[in-house]
């Protein structure tokens, strides 16, 4: 496997033509600010630079390149595989409005005996990504790793874009399948959030909407518990997500970020499903713990010292807001856990991360984590 990474500052997209792999590249990822990629100029420049490649890109909440976080730029990753075959599948929110059925459709297109793993990028606002991943897992089982993330839109939360071999657009869901036994796919995901308060019970919910917790209106409970914190902090909901788990399985708890508090019906809308009957607990972000979470995500990856490899870092936009000026430190934390001389590091800040859970190996949607996916060929 040969790897080529590039980073393009605003106004420097002409350098997209200055490539090494060129016609040899099989797959190109690009991650960029919505305004940088929405008119299709980046895609078309990449298509000219890598004419034989599958080209997949998305909008972000910030671009990760090497050890640094950027805004309003484009980070690219081109891969030339020596022994691995590729196939892609795509659908959109209009064709498959039900996330579960969309996941089943994409997985069915990619399923083969020699499937090694799937990298997924989906719209971060229109798609029920929890159900999308569950739909894929229902077809593929837990032995096929599914990794990736949801497109972002900075702190705007207005429109997210995904594009496969065309100008990026809203509502898209894309999977890239990797085939053959020479490719090694690694993954790691961790949060580092601290418990904040007692354990509660989700007594009424539907999909990603929480109506009652401990029998009380959800938004009233949330605002009442946080008290003055709700008025003192901008984006306070990102500082206090929920940890959610079924009875007896707290080790497999997952984080869900609060998206909106709805005053009319006193509900809370989350970025992923929050199942009725599960336990819930408020969490809070302390910077040292969040940085350690990023380090632990990197430690779950095992890479050889003598082979070229790539690590795609996908961290939650909520983490970036909470970390503030320390956001770059979590990228450095991953780098310290991956001290491989031939590992290329790129990625983006997302509206959700997709990876198998360490405890169960079942692929799921995560929020407020640092998630890392790695690739190398033997």
Image (tube, rainbow, N blue to C red):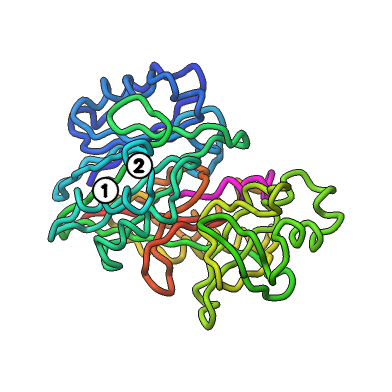
Q: Is residue 146 left or right of residue 234?
A: left
Residue 177 drawn above or below residue 215:
above
The quadrant of the picture occupied by the C terminus is bottom left
Q: Which residue is mark 1?
A: 106
Which of the 4 quarters of the picture holds residue 96?
top left
Point out residue 356 in the picture as x, y percentages from the top left corner. 39, 64
- Name the residue nearer the viewer: 3 or 90: 90
Label 1 crowd (10 A; few <14 / some 14-19 / many >=20): many
Tell me the CA gap for discs 1 and 2. 8 Å
Residue at the (46%, 18%) spot, across then down = 12
Residue 300 is covered by the magenta coloring = no
Is residue 134 in sight in this rendering? yes
- Name the residue nearer the viewer: 40 or 348: 40
Residue at the (16%, 50%) spot, across then down = 84
Q: Which residues are magenta?
A: 313-325
At mark 1, the secondary structure is helix
Q: Are marks 1 and 2 in contact (CB under 8 Å)?
A: yes
Q: Which residue is mark 2?
A: 173
Point out residue 204 in the picture as x, y percentages from the top left corner. 60, 65
Tell me which numbered mark, 1 or 2, is placed earlier along the sequence: 1
- Name the residue nearer the viewer: 14 or 137: 137
Residue 196 drawn above or below residue 6:
below
Is residue 333 in sight in this rendering? no
Which of the 4 quarters of the picture holds residue 289?
bottom right
At mark 2, the secondary structure is strand
């Amino acid at each position: 496997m040969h790897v080529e990474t590039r980073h393009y500052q605003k106004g420097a997209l002409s350098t997209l033509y200055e490539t090494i792999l060129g016609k040899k590249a099989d797959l190109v990822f690009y991650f960029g600010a919505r305004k940088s990629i929405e008119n299709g100029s980046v895609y078309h420049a990449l298509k000219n630079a890598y004419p034989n490649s599958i080209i997949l890109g998305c909008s972000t909440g910030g671009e990760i390149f090497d050890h640094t976080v950027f805004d309003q730029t484009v980070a690219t990753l081109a891969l030339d595989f020596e022994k691995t075959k590729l196939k892609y599948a795509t659908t959109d929110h209009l064709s498959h409005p039900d996330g579960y059925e969309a996941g089943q459709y994409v997985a069915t297109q990619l399923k083969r005996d020699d499937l090694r793993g799937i990298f997924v990028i989906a719209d971060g606002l229109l798609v029920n990504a929890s159900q999308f991943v569950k739909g894929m897992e229902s077809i593929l089982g837990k032995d096929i790793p599914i990794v990736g993330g949801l497109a972002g839109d900075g702190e705007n939360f207005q429109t997210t874009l995904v594009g496969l071999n065309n100008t990026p657009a809203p509502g898209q869901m894309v999977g890239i399948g990797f085939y053959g036994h020479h490719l090694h796919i690694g993954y790691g995901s961790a949060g580092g959030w601290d418990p904040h308060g007692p354990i509660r019970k989700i007594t009424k919910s539907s999909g990603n909407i929480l109506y009652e917790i401990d029998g009380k209106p959800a938004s009233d409970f949330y605002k009442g518990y946080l008290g003055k914190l709700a008025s003192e902090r901008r984006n306070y909901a990102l500082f206090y997500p929920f940890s959610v788990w079924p009875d007896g399985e707290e080790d497999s708890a997952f984080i869900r970020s609060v998206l909106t508090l709805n005053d009319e019906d006193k509900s809370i809308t989350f970025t992923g499903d929050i199942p009725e009957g599960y336990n819930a607990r408020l969490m809070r972000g302390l910077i040292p713990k969040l940085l350690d979470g990023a380090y632990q995500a990197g430690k779950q990856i095992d890479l050889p010292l003598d082979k070229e490899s790539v690590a795609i870092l996908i961290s939650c936009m909520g983490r970036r807001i909470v970390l503030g000026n320390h956001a770059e430190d979590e990228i450095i934390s991953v780098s310290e856990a991956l001290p491989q001389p031939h590992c290329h590091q790129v990625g983006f800040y997302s509206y959700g991360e997709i990876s198998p859970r360490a405890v169960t190996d079942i692929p799921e949607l995560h929020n407020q984590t640092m998630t890392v996916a790695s690739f190398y060929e033997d």
